[in-house]
Image (tube, coloured by chain):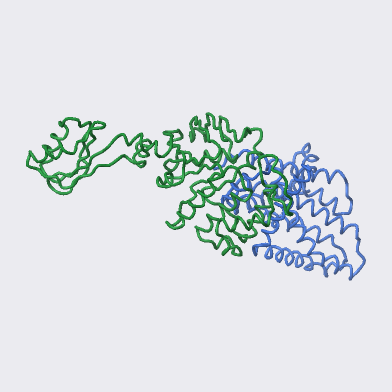
Amino acid sequence: MIEIKNLTKKFGSNTILDNITFSVKKGEVLGFLGPNGAGKTTTMKIITSFWSPTSGQVEVDGLDARKNSLGIRKRIGYLPETVPLYDDMLVFEYLKFVAEIRGLAKEGIKRAATNGAHANALNMKQRIKEVVKLCGLAGVIRQPIEELSKGYRQRVGLAQAIMHDPDILILDEPTTGLDPNQIIEIRNLIKELAKEKTIILSTHILGEVSATCDRVIIINKGKIAGEGSPAELAKKAGARELIYVKIKGPREEVFGKLKAMENVVKAEIKDKESENVYGYEIEPRTGIDLRESLSMAVMNNGWSILEFNKKLVSLEDVFRELTK
Amino acid sequence: MRKSQYIKTIYILFKKELMSYFNSPIAYIFIGVFLVVGNWLFFKDFFLMGQASLRNYLGLLPWIFLFLSPAITMRLWSEEKKSGTIEFLLTLPITDWQVVLAKFFSSLAFLFISLILSISLPVTIAFLGNIDIGSIIGGYIGALFLGGSYLALGLFISSLTKNQIIAFIVALMACFAAFIVGADFVLAGAPKFAVPVMKFLGLGSHFYNIAKGVIDTKDIIYYCSFIFLFLWLNVRVIESRGWK
């Protein structure tokens, strides 16, 4: 559905995107993950034809962006990060304008979708009603956009993006600035839409990725730093099991003992609770259960364990690892 | 079919732009100021001169427009850029030309509406004496072309900045320069070989030709090329998308 090849974007000598290549299959929900300024938004702006790349190729549904940008724009619904809306319009006026400019038919013409864009097969009034219901806008339809809360703005932005029933949705941080309830609402809406659409969404919230995406691309400093399903990524790093243990005992001695233990790959001092009480993080050799020998070792030296837990490296750690 | 779709899209944008003038109080303030200032400047000398003629008023129009046109165009691009709606607008399946034309014609329509509302002036004068209908129609057509040129220039300048105030002031200066370059007192100080060129380039000299009631294709073509040049430059700026 979407093919990105060797995409590079520079502003002057500043390289924002550095030779990025990836593709999105039909029906897939792809998550762009990365710290702020990594190049997520830039990639989206290029796919939606707002910017042109310095070099590289963008192909959407078989159309080349350089030759047929208008065709691509018809197939895409886009929610920019800043959710720009015309503040002086009423919600209803705005949605009607979007429907008109997207070429929805005023009368109930049921024309077959000819060019992959379904817009001209949709009836405007009916579609606006549908979208208003889907995005939960019925209560604010007569309000000026400038008076809307952040949550409602986001929904109007989403309504705008899905108005013409596009095959592809590009959502740039669709849940930033929302309260927890709103975040769940928007996520559910995205899940609902994901049933029939190809979606690219960007975020720097990790929970969001595992909640909504089939596949994740981690971008850092303009490069792809990792790729895979959320489970795959977690597994990739989850192979590394970590043990956190808080031990009461002289620091240097305990630390030396831990490092010298059999089957320990790495040990480090994590934190300090008080004099002689330190937290240590230990990475055992893969597949080895270290718990027993560890507690034995501590007991034998007359120290004591105050806290003990085992953790799998989560997506969060993968993210931090890859974007360090 | 393709062509009618093209025009229809421009019309939808045009409607939206025109509506946004009247959605804010700016439009009403604008028209109010235009009518009050225009009428006052006209009637100030009208009874002194004791002549049922609009010539005086038409002579004032380029100066009034000089301030009003940049006020109309200043926000057209800069506000889109500042609020980010430009990203929405330019990722719609429409061409840059469609957007630029829609913005230009909506501003022209707005100027036209204000001009129509000043129709009370010629009507008043018609009651007071015989007036030359030809010169009035010519004057209004000339004013529209001159205003259109100011607007095209102002629209282009608005596309260069996020800041409305800067757009206004720079457009005002640019319009002033374009207007004054063919005026007599500027030509007097210019080198001899440049005089005919400058006289042709100035927006003003063409206006006074038309305002006299003489509609010459040369003047019309001049205005149309001037407008086209700046709309074209505007499209180039939009296309480059170098801004961030």
Q: Image quarter for residue B23? A: bottom right
x and y, in percent, of residue A302 in the image: 7, 42
Q: Image quadrant for the N terminus of chain A?
A: top right
Horizontal relation, residue B235 to residue A183: left or right: right
Q: In the image, what residue occupies the spot 77% across and 51% down?
A: B146
All told, the count of numbered labels is 0
Horizontal relation, residue A43 to residue B156: left or right: left
Q: Would you place residue B26 above or below residue A68 in this image? A: below
Nearer-the-camera pick, A263 or A143: A263
Chain A rendering hue: green
Q: Would you place residue B46 above or below residue A283 in this image? A: below
Q: Would you place residue B11 above or below residue A249 in this image? A: below
Horizontal relation, residue B96 to residue B146: left or right: left
Q: Image quadrant for the C terminus of chain A?
A: top left
Nearer-the-camera pick, B80 or A101: A101
x and y, in percent, of residue B94 in the image: 68, 44
Nearer-the-camera pick, A137 or B3: A137
Q: In the image, what residue occupies the spot 55% across and 59% down?
A: A136
x and y, in percent, of residue A146 in the image: 56, 61
Q: In the image, what residue occupies the spot 59% across and 41% down?
A: A50
Chain B rendering hue: blue
x and y, in percent, of residue A280 in the image: 20, 41
